[in-house]
Amino acid sequence: MAIRELKVCLLGDTGVGKSSIVCRFVQDHFDHNVSPTIGASFLTKTVPCGHELHKFLIWDTAGQERFHSLAPMYYRGSAAAVIVYDITKLDSFQTLKKWVKELKEHGPEDIIVALAGNKKDLGDIREVPMKEAKDFAESIAAIFMETSARNAVNVEELFQKISKCFSLEFMLARWFAPYDHIKHCLDCFIRNCYGICSMGRQGSLVVRAVGLITERLPDRIPELTR
Ligand SMILES: Nc1nc2c(ncn2[C@@H]2O[C@H](COP(=O)(O)OP(=O)(O)OP(=O)(O)O)[C@@H](O)[C@H]2O)c(=O)[nH]1
Ligand SMILES: [Mg+2]
């Protein structure tokens, strides 16, 4: 099975639960007395996604202001960024918006952004209405989930959603969206592509997709590029 590596960084205010989310996802563990992150920490986890394995290379950054200048090192080259806020702290949602802006201005052009409203278990003292966060996420075409690292709510699901964005079907569907009228051709192409992918070739799926079209469907190029 082909392994695809996905660099993911976590950003957000100190104390919102970035390390706790990563710890829940990677080790299925929650620590009430976790220390603030210094610099950043790195963990990995491999999950199945359709006909592939996705290996998350996770950079859990430090939210304290003194570490802010290090962040570009981690979001540069990231396939996805998870920006975390604490639903009980309105300030942390404002910080999230600053991160969105910074990513838009300086982050990778095609980065997938996921917003995570953590500490869902403390819903009775929430300061950020879910609808407000959801609407904001929609306005920037980001994934949105409220999570609880403490109670293991929506953490796995959050990473699954990110993983799906890098599945072959999703990437090709996005890439081919303007060519919906040749759906049959696309379906054949996806099947062919899986045959090659399962042989474990390296490289970007989309680049491979273009290569395969050229190689296997040369007569369809005029249609695809019209
Ligand atoms: N109730 C509750 N507490 C949580 C949750 N997630 C994290 N916490 C607590 O929030 C505090 C901060 O969590 P961290 O994971 O260290 O936060 P962080 O975002 O990594 O902070 P920095 O490393 O300083 O940027 C800890 O006391 C955690 O136990 C959650 O889902 N629910
Ligand atoms: Mg941390």
Image (cartoon, rainbow, N blue to C red):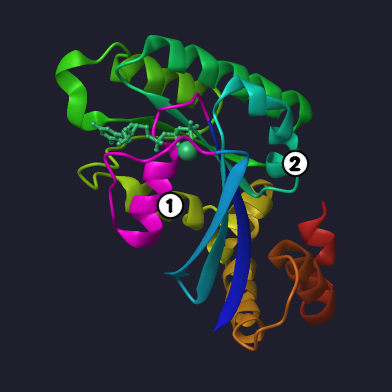
**Amino acid at pointer 1:** Phe
Disc 2 target residue:
73
Disc 1 target residue:
159
Q: Using residue 85 as the reference point, say whether residue 103 is left or right of it.
A: right
Q: Can residue 110 be seen in the rendering of this structure?
A: no
Of marks 2 and 1, the one in the foreground: 2
Q: Which mark is residue 167?
A: none
The quarter of the rendered structure image containing the N terminus is bottom right
**Amino acid at pointer 2:** Met
Q: Is residue 26 magenta?
A: yes
Q: Is residue 132 magenta?
A: no
Classify residue 144 by image quadrant: top left
Q: Earlier in the sequence, mark 2 or mark 1?
A: 2
Element class at badge 1:
helix
Q: Using residue 115 as the reference point, say whether residue 221 is left or right of it.
A: right
The residue located at (71%, 82%) in the rendering is 201
Q: Using residue 175 as the reference point, say whether residue 26 is left or right of it.
A: left
* Nearer to the camera, 143 or 12: 12
* Nearer to the camera, 112 or 122: 122
In the image, residue 226 above or below residue 150: below
Classify residue 11 by image quadrant: top right
Quarter holding ligand 1? top left
Q: Residue furthest left?
A: 124
x, y percent for residue 93: 45, 16
The residue stretch that appears in magenta: 12-37
